[in-house]
Image (cartoon, rainbow, N blue to C red):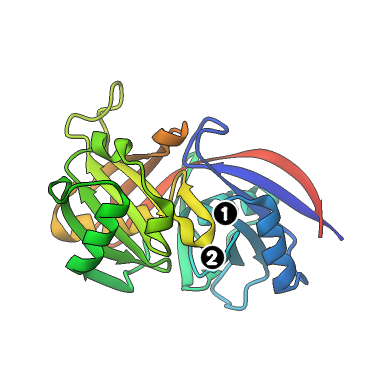
Amino acid sequence: MSRRFQQVDVFSSVPIAGNPVAVVIDAEGLADEAMAAFARWTNLSETTFLLPPTSAAADYRLRIFTPGGELPFAGHPTLGSAHAWLGSGGVPKGERIVQECGIGLVEIRRDGAELAFAAPPLIRSGPVDSDTVREVTAALGLQPADVVDAEWVANGPDWMVVALTSGDLVREVTPDMAALGTQNVGLLGAHPDGLPGEPEVAFEVRAFVPGIGVPEDPVTGSLNAGIAVWLRREGKAPADYVAAQGTVLGRAGRIHVTDDGTDIWVGGAATTVIAGTVNL
């Protein structure tokens, strides 16, 4: 069966500089096995499937697959899928887009050319235990003195964030993926003076998820959402900031975070790179 399809680049206004997500727009009737097989075939960090909602409050339902299995929530697929849904004629019921997914309902707002989702609450938080920190630090090829903090920031994916002494050090890390195993590890480091020509970039982020077939994710919405919730709770970041991700992979992802006092919004640009149909 021919189904509408888009491949959307997320967290960059320039095509192929962000993180791509494959979006099957007309996914109704597809079996779980077919979704999983197509996600393995695309071999992207995530492939999504747009379905009719089961909640009256939602505009659509989204299922999110990695090459290794299904996720209850992920950030860049949320924004890329909303972009594809709007571009294929979707009209929100209300002022904001409401996505139904594995963690429930997620609000998405439009701000000019950008989309942003409301960061979901953390389902696991608190300091990472010292044994796990030692194991992860060794797998990352780091010394204990390189690590300033380690915190669980799980909001669907079971993320831990390891904060390093600088954004430059984040870029230098060469992890041992086999040693990381099934850990979902995010790295965070500050850029106190921003980046050349981009003084608003406050942090550098990287994400490693080898356990689900994604050694390094180019730009990661769920991780950045968890980081933002943690940083704002601890007063370690301003209400508005930009994080860079994907630098080591030759990408230029930019994640815009805004805390409006009620919700923390995580957003960026999205661009359709491929549009057509897929036979599934």
Q: Is residue 220 visible?
A: yes
Q: Between residue 209 and residue 194, name the one nearer to us.
A: 209
- Quarter of the image where the C terminus is located: bottom right
Q: Between residue 172 and residue 202, name the one nearer to us.
A: 172
Three-letter code for the amino acid on which mark 2 is drawn = Gln
Q: x, y percentage for residue 172?
A: 30, 36
Q: x, y percentage for residue 245?
A: 38, 40
Tell me the crowding category of disc 1: few under 14, some 14 to 19, or many 20 or more residues within 10 angstroms, Cα based: many
Secondary element type, mark 2: strand
Three-letter code for the amino acid on which mark 1 is drawn = Ala
Could you tell me which residue is drawn at 38 percent across and 63 percent down? 183
Residue 227 horizontal side relative to residue 61, left or right: left
Which circle marks residue 82 in the picture? 1
Residue 106 horizontal side relative to residue 192, left or right: right
Q: Are marks 1 and 2 in contact (CB under 8 Å)?
A: yes
Could you tell me which residue is drawn at 73 percent across and 42 percent down? 275
Could you tell me which residue is drawn at 48 percent across and 65 percent down? 73
Q: Is residue 128 visible?
A: no
- Quarter of the image where the N terminus is located: bottom right
Residue 244 horizontal side relative to residue 105, left or right: left
Task: From this view, report whether residue 54 is shown above or below residue 46.
Answer: below
Could you tell me which residue is drawn at 47 percent across and 31 percent down? 250
Distance (Cα) linking label 1 and label 2: 8 Å
Tell me the crowding category of disc 2: few under 14, some 14 to 19, or many 20 or more residues within 10 angstroms, Cα based: many
In this figure, which residue is indicated by the disc labeled 2?
99
| Residue that extends furthest to the right in the rendered view of this protein | 1
Q: First in sequence: mark 1 or mark 2?
A: 1
Q: x, y percentage for residue 262?
A: 28, 62
